[in-house]
Amino acid sequence: MNIKENNKVEVCLDNQQFTMKPTDKEDAPKISKRIGRQVVEITMGELSQELTKGRSMTCATFKNNERGKANLSKIEVLALDFDNKQLEHYFSIEDALKNNFLCENASFLYQTFSSTKENERFRVVFRLSCPIYTNEEYEFIYQKLIKMYPSLDTATKDTSRIFYGGRDLIMIDENNILDVAEMSKDFDYELMEKKKEQKLKDAKKYREIDTSKENDYLSKLEHDWASSLFKNIKNGYYNIEETKNKAPKFNQIFANRASAAMYFEKIYMPGFLGLPEYMAFNSIIRYDKTPSATIFEDEISEVWLYHDFGTGETFNIIGIVQRLLPPDTTKTGERMVSRKKALEYLLDITGCKVEMNEPVKEVHEFVEELKSLLLNPNLKEQEPEVFQLFARYKYVDSICSLLDIFKNNIYEDDKGNLSCLSWNSIDSLAKSLNTSKDNISRRLKLMTLTGIVDCLDNNQLPSDLLEMLNSGQENYIDKNGMKIKRKNKKKYRSNVHKISENNTIENFISRCKLLVENNYSTGALSKEWVERVLGKK
C-alpha cells in the first residue's frame, strides 16, 4: 500500500453547512458550480465531522478546479450510497456494522437527511490506499462493490458525484484503508488505453456543436427529426406534426406504460437524439457556452442516461423530453410536463402504443372503480358495510397503494399470457408503505376475504414462476450475486396474489355485506369461520 504519511486525503468540501438536504432548485446548482474550487487536505476523522455538519463533498479533485468527469485529477476517498430503493436487497445500518468487509475497510458511515427508521439511508466512506487517476479504474472498483451490495445507488459511481452531508455519524475505524491494488487486480489497463484511442477516433466522426451560436447549433445536429424538435423548442413554438413526420418509427405495442418506459429508456440514446456518446457536448436543454453534457449507458440497468455537469442533473430519455416539451401552464405558473405526458409524446411520434389485453384491461378498470368507491367521501352513507370494513379503521389509503402495486406488476408466462400477479413478501410491502408487517397482513386478509385478490395455490401458478419461488425456499442470493444454499430450507414460499379477474363492484359490495352480517373481525378470524361463511378453505 502507498499511504500518505500525514494520514490526510484531498477532497472537494463545500463551505456551506445544511441541516436538511439542499434544495434542487436553489442550493444544489450553487454547490455544483463552486465545489470544484474548494479543495481541502483533511484527515478522515475531520472529514466525518464536517460531513455530519451538513457540508457536501466530492471524493475526487479536478483539473482547473472545474467539477466534471472529464476533468478528473485524482481520487483518494470512496463513498458508497446505500439508498435502499430496492427493498428486496434492503441493507440496514445494523447489517453494515456486522459486515466483515465494511468493518475491515471502511472509516465511517453517516445517515442522509432523508433517512428514516423504516427506510435507513446512509453513506459509508473509505480512505484509499493510493490515489486513483482514471475514471475507468474507479468505476471498475465501484462495479465490484455494487455486486457485493445490490442496495447501493448505482448513479454514485460517477467520479464527479456530489455527496451531500447528513447526520448521526458512526465511526468504524479511522485507520482503516481500502486496498486499491487488491480491488483493481483484475482491471485491464491495456484495454482501457485501447478504448481511449477508439473514443478519440470516434470523436472525429461528430461535427462540433456550439450552442453559443444558436443557428449553427441547430444546423449541425445529426438527425432531421431531432433538429426539428430542438428547433421548435429553442424558437419558442412547438409543431408536433413536423417532428412526428421525421421521427424514427419503432411501431411497438406494449402491454402497459411501465414496459413502454423501459423500452425507451434502453434504446440507443446517442443514435436516437443524434448526439455523441461518452463525450462532452453542449447542453440541449439550456443555453450552454462550453460543452458540459454527456450521454452514457449504465452498465447494470442498461439504461442510457444524459448527464449535465453544469447542473449536476442526470436523467433518461423521458426526463429529456419532459424538459424539452413546452411546460404545462397552471394557475400558479408554468411547470415541467409530467412523466406520463412525455412518455405519451414518445409513443406518439415513434408509432408505438400501449394496448393491454382484455383481462388485464378489465382488472385495471376494476381497480380504478374500486379505488373511486373506497375514496368516496359519502361512502358511510352509501355503502355502510364497505365503510365499516375499510374506512372505519383507516385502511383505505394503504389498500389503494397495494392495489396500485398489484395492478402494475404484470406477469407474462411462457405462452405470452399477461396477468396481474404479485409475489412481494409482506416484509417488502411493509417497507414500501412505511408500515408494520402486521398491518400489511391484516389488509391482505381483508382484500382476500372480500374477493379483491386471490391467494394462488401451487396448481394455479405458472410453472416457471412456481419453480423460481421454490428455488427461493432452498437458496438465497448473497451480496456478490451468487446463489447460496440455505442451511435451513424455508418452510413456506412467498404468497402470490392475483387481482381477481371478472370481478365487479357489485360482487365486492355483496361480499362486504356477508362479512359484516357474520360479525367479521381480524381478531376472531379462524379457519372454521372462513369455511362456515365463505364455504372454502
Image (spheres, rainbow, N blue to C red):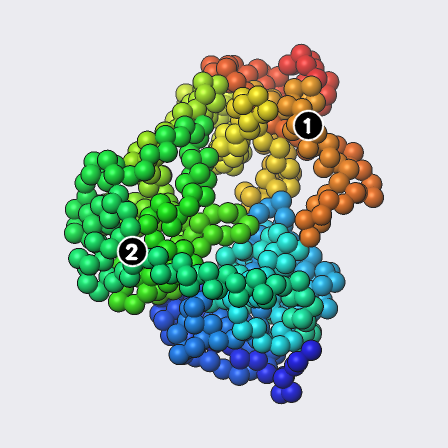
Q: Amino acid at mark 1?
A: Leu
Do labels 2 and 1 touch, CB within 8 Å?
A: no
Front position in the image: 436 or 234: 234
**Label 2 belongs to which residue?**
284
The residue positioned 69% from the left and 19% from the top of the image is: 459
Q: CA distance from mark 2 to mark 1?
A: 47 Å
Horizontal placement of 136 versus 293: left or right?
right
Query: Furthest residue to the right?
Result: 487
Q: Would you identify the image quadrant in which residue 26 lies? A: bottom left
Tell me residue 24's x, y (percent): 37, 60
**Mark 2 or 1, closer to the camera:** 2
The residue positioned 35% from the left and 45% from the top of the image is: 272
Quarter of the image where the N terminus is located: bottom right
Quarter of the image where the C terminus is located: top right
The residue positioned 42% from the left and 46% from the top of the image is: 268
**Label 1 belongs to which residue?**
466
Label 2 sits on a secondary structure element that is loop
Tell me residue 396's x, y (percent): 49, 33
